[in-house]
Amino acid sequence: MEVINESKSMLSNFEVLSLLTDIQTGKGQRKPNKHQQNLATITYEAVKYLEGTPCKLQDAESIQKFMDAIKPFKLTRAEKLQLLNHRPSTAVEIQIMIEESEERLTEDQIYELLDLLAKYLPSDKEEEMEQDEEDGDGEMEEEEES
């Protein structure tokens, strides 16, 4: 199959992180050699940045399930990519990412999108809250034992 227009392809942050991680480890790609030091630096910095974004918690299966679940919303490819990469957690964030959202989506649909995001794409905030709850429970048990 031939790529018709390379500039029309859009990669998610998850795909970029996967590719760059493969380059760093030499898995499926050649590792940058000493003559490609700039590439190694750019790869390192990009991976470091992307690991601080929601894509570090995503996987191909959950992304596919999310994309299937949002088909009824008739979003553009760019809007789907925005939702995937930024993983909004509020209605305001969704309204900013989706063009003319007030005309295209009802309030219920916006909250349904938020539910689908929470169901299929984990966020750092949820992970931190779970960790805080675990830490909090542990502290309570220690205090009770004293």
Image: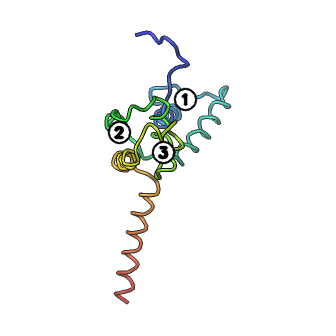
Mark 3–mark 2 Cα distance, whole angstroms, equals 15 Å
Q: Is residue 21 visible?
A: no
Q: What type is the residue that disc 3 sits on?
A: Ile
Q: What type is the residue that disc 1 sits on?
A: Lys
**Quadrant containing the C terminus in the rendered view:** bottom left
Q: Which residue is mark 2?
A: 66
Q: Quadrant of residue 129?
A: bottom left
Image coordinates for residue 98, horizontal then vertical, percent: 49, 38
Secondary element at image label 2: helix
Q: Which residue is mark 1?
A: 31
Q: Is residue 59 visible?
A: yes
Tell which of 48 and 63 is nearer to you.
63
Mark 1–mark 2 Cα distance, whole angstroms, equals 32 Å
Secondary element at image label 1: loop
Q: What type is the residue that disc 2 sits on?
A: Phe
The label nearer to you, 3 versus 1, is 3
Mark 1 or 2, nearer chain start: 1
| Above or below, 126 relative to 19 | below
Tell which of 124 and 99 is nearer to you.
99
Tell which of 130 and 82 is nearer to you.
82
Q: Quadrant of residue 141?
A: bottom left
Secondary element at image label 3: helix
Residue drawn at (39%, 85%) of the image: 143
Res 94 label: 3
